[in-house]
Amino acid sequence: MEPGNNTQFSEFFLLGFSEDPELQPLIFGLFLSMYLIGVFGNLLIILATISDSHLHTPMYFFLSNLSFVDICLTSTTIPKMLKNIENQSKAITYEGCIVQVYFYIFFAGIDDFLLTVMAYDRFVAICHPLHYTVIMNPQLCGLLVLMPWMMSAMHSLLQSLLALKLTFCTEVEIPHFFCDLSQMVQLACSNTFLNDMVMYVASVLLAGGPFAGILYSYSKIVSAIRRISSTQGKLKAFSTCASHLSVVFLFYCTSLGVYLSSAATYSSRASATASVMYTVVTPMLNPFIYSLRNKDIKRALKRVYGIIAIKRPIVLGQMKCP
């Protein structure tokens, strides 16, 4: 198969989950529902943390940033997939694919780093409670959020620039619902050694590093909780990080475990199905995980709902006025 001219190459074809026309309305409805639930759920978390002064703490500052990044992550892939299903088209332009690769890696990397930052926040809160406000000052919190954005931006830019150097054959069909970089590299007609090496090193450093940081933080947290004498004190300390631990477990188990199982079957469609878990399902479930057992979030959400309920009759009343 001869390599195509990269300057004449114009588009990729995203094969998605199924080519059966009868399943397309079901897939469209399912993903539209998950997307809307995820977006509105994370928006509510952001509104709750902004509107309630009791939530103006480092933990909820990081949570609101995580919610914003989750919205951006799902918005990078799902709207394009829904548009293709609606238009009965599988095409995405070459430029659009590179842009999607950049923003997908960008927001997925920030997501990973923010989970590590939140683990560090819980470590300070439980292991150094008396110095928490001093250590987690506004300057440090801002830096802990800014650094993931900068590091992820540089990483995604590097991967995108290397992807631009790849040449492809005349028609490239990606067995995925979005432009996955690993799938693109596999389908390239040019030498992909440098791309493979950069992806491998990045996965070790930028995925393994944050995961090691989370493990270290929780090892210290467990040690601190074990030293607490009362059972009630242990439960209270554990409850402050239970939601974050659930999100970490969900994120890493879906992104690592399911991907490993799909790689073992050598099925690209299985890989696409696996990626749904951490690109769509995890961002959708995060607001529920953080709000179901969190009294502060519940109170703030009720306040937001109350404000909306009060303003709505006023707006309707003004519309009725001549």
Image (tube, helix red, strand yellow):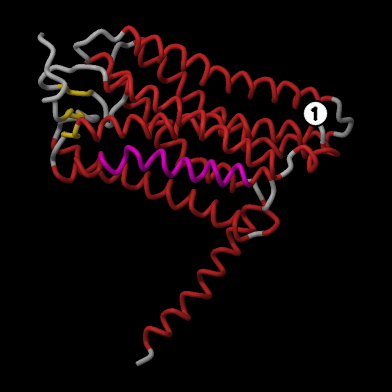
Residue pointed to by mark 1: 225
Q: Is residue 244 left or right of residue 102?
A: right
Instruction: Find residue 312 and report its horizontal and vertical position in percent.
Output: 46, 75
Q: Main secondary structure of the magenta part?
A: helix
User: Residue at 61% of width from left, 42% of height from top?
Assistant: 62
Of residues 291 and 173, the one drawn nearer to the viewer in this rendering: 173
User: Residue at 66% of width from left, 40% of height from top?
Assistant: 141
Q: Quadrant location of the C terminus?
A: bottom left
Q: Is residue 105 magenta?
A: no
Q: Is residue 204 left or right of residue 261?
A: right
Q: Is residue 271 visible?
A: no
Instruction: Find residue 47 and report its horizontal and vertical position in percent.
Output: 54, 57
159 over 186 or under it: above or below: below
What is the total number of numbered labels drawn onto the structure image? 1
Residue 100: quarter of image: top left
Q: Is residue 68 magenta?
A: yes
Q: Is residue 82 left or right of residue 260?
A: left
Instruction: Find residue 75 and report its horizontal and vertical position in percent.
Output: 36, 43
34 over 107 or under it: above or below: below
User: Residue at 25% of width from left, 39% of height from top?
Assistant: 81
Q: Badge 1, how many Cα within 10 Å: few under 14, some, many 20+?
A: some
Q: Amino acid at mark 1?
A: Ile
Of residues 23 and 320, the one drawn nearer to the viewer in this rendering: 320
86 over 168 or under it: above or below: below
Name the outermost residue toward the bottom: 322
Secondary structure under tag 1 reads: helix
Q: Quadrant location of the N terminus?
A: top left
Instruction: Find residue 125 and report its horizontal and vertical position in percent.
Output: 76, 37
305 over 279 or under it: above or below: below
Q: Which residues are magenta?
A: 61-80
Of residues 197 and 127, the one drawn nearer to the viewer in this rendering: 197
Residue 268: quarter of image: top left
